[in-house]
Each structure stands twice: as structure tokens, then as C-alpha cells.
Amino acid sequence: MSSTEAPYSIGTPGRPWGEAEVALWLSRQVVQRSYAADVVSVIDTFRSRFDVSEYGRIDYAPDSYPLFAIRSRDWNDALPVVLVTGGVHGYETSGVHGALQFVDRQMANYAGRVNILLAPCISPWAYERIHRWNADALDPNRSFRADSPAQESAALMRLVEPIRARALMHIDLHETTDTDESEFRPALAARDGIHYEPDDIPDGFYLVDDSENPQPAFQQAVIAAVAKVTHIAPADERGEIIGSPMVAPGVIEYSLKKLGLCARVTDAPYVTTTEVYPDSPRATPEQCNAAQVAAVCAAIDFVLAEVASA
């Protein structure tokens, strides 16, 4: 930490948080929007067109949140299966509302061609508080592993277990925001008692591929579709996007399984994580939602073309 950089407001620099620090952090989290009004009410409008089911609940007393999945009606085991997820990080708004917009405007177009399983808001507690973590100060998107400590991650893993080996594609909808640098990364460093190294926020949309099974043609198909809706993030002066080398226009790679990321919750050969930048002066909330929808459609279209040509 530089001499001009103030320490995070909770904890002692260099010392990981204990129960007291987590409790103090939790006491500062306040509800800023309604999961029931913003998300559940929209899901309810889909019940006449798609199969909607409750796949679990998130309980942080006194709060309890039902978790919902939306499936293609007339699911056909002879068809390929794709997974769409949003709201792993509750503060990433277009991940949730882009998923809901896809259901409303596009999902029916794929009837009879592919089975779609969609979980639009994996972290409702964090959605309401516009936060990255859950109420235990854990990041669900680092918790997709056996014996997960995060309720949100464990619930999704149970949901997808029946299709885990069958899934052909999984697209996980996210955002990178200015608050990643102003709040969430400093909080992470403070929580873990490590040094915080500031980084730049990329201006534009990008994707995260799986370094263990990269699929460059798939990623570029998604990038090409989204470029018609919003701008694609360039690399910085180091040739990187958010600290990782840009391996193709708008694409970086992570070791998804090792990091416990949602995009590797199945064995699907085609996976990607979207990253929309809602704080750009060149993007509106409507564009951000539309970018997520374009990404989902392009991803499904790509894998269906692959199936057709096989």
C-alpha cells in the first residue's frame, strides 16, 4: 500500500478479517432494491410460456430468497442442452436483466432446437444490496467447488448436476464496473490481509475463456455479435485486460475450474463469461442488457451450427 493510499475502512492492513470484521462489514450492507419486485415479478410473467421452478432458497436470517430456474417447455432429451446463468455477482445488473430479457424476447425462438436451462439471479441477497459477496463475505464466483462454502454456488451445482455431463454450452453473464476498483477489490485485499494493487477498468465488453479448454472461434462469434450492440474493450498498454493477456480481440483466459468459477460448473466444451462495462459513457443500461442478449444468442447459434455440421 502506498503512502497516499488510505487503508480499507474495515480491518488492519496485513491481517485477515476475523468474525468481528465480517460482522462489522455485514452491518454496513443495506437493501437498495427489491429482488421480489425487480426479478421474481418478471419471472412470474414467463410461467405461461416456459417451465419455471424453484430450485432452492437462500437463507440469511431474517431474510429468505427463493431461487428460480427457467427451462424450455417440452424439454426433449434428444436435443442438445445449454446453460445460461446471471447474477452470480448480485451487483452486476445486466447479468440479471439481460438474462430475463433473453427469456422474454428470444428464448422461444429456440424451441424444438435446443434445451435451455436458465438461472437468472443466483445471488438475490447481493442483488438487493448491490454487492459482489454474499452475507458471509464470500464471493460465490470463487466457490463453485465440492463442499462449497457459499449457499448460492451449492444451490446452482445441485440444479445443474443432472445436465452437468450433457451440457454443450454454458454462458455466464457478468459486468466489470468502476466499483470493482473503488470498493470490491480493496475489500477483498483487506478481507484476506494482502496488499492491494490498483488496476485499470477496461472500457468495453470482453469475454473470459477457459485456459484449460480454449475455444477461440466460439469466443470470436460472441464478440462479433456483441460488437454490433456495444464497443469491445481494447487491451491496455501492457497488452492486457484487467491484468490478463488479451489472447484475441476482447478475449482473456482464466483457469476456470481451478478458480472455482461458475462458467466451469458443467463439463460443457463451450463456455464463456461475459463482462459488460455499464459505467462507460458510451453505453446505456439498455445497451448493456442488449449486449448480454446478443451474447447468449450468438453462443447458442454457434453451438447449434457446430452440431448441425458434425
Image (cartoon, helix red, strand yellow):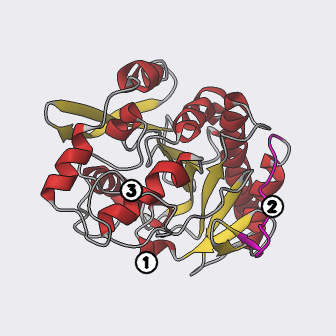
Residue 276 image position (x, y, % from top left): 66, 47
- Pointer 2 local density, CA inside 10 Å: few below 14, some 14–19, many at least 20: some
Image disc number at residue 17: none
Sequence-first tag of 1 and 2: 2
Q: Which residue is mark 2?
A: 234
138 to the left or right of 242? left
Marks 3/1: CA–CA distance: 22 Å
Sequence-first tag of 3 and 2: 3
Looking at numbered disc 1 in the image, what kind of residue is underneath it?
Answer: Lys
Residue shown at 66% from the left, 27% from the top: 105
Marks 3/2: CA–CA distance: 27 Å
SS at mark 1?
helix
Residue 55 image position (x, y, % from top left): 30, 41
State yes or no: residue 235 in magenta. Answer: yes
Q: Which residue is mark 1?
A: 258
Residue 3 seen in render = yes
Dominant SS in magenta: loop
224 to the left or right of 113? right
Marks 1/2: CA–CA distance: 26 Å
* Depicted 40 relative to depicted 65: above or below: above
Looking at numbered disc 2 in the image, what kind of residue is underneath it?
Answer: Pro
Indicate the quadrant where residue 30 lies: top left
Sequence-first tag of 3 and 1: 3
State the extent of the magenta-drawn residues as a range.
229-240
Looking at numbered disc 3 in the image, what kind of residue is underneath it?
Answer: Ala
**Quadrant where the image shows the C terminus:** bottom right
Residue 226 image position (x, y, % from top left): 78, 47
SS at mark 3?
helix
Front residue of this view, candidates 95 and 11:
11
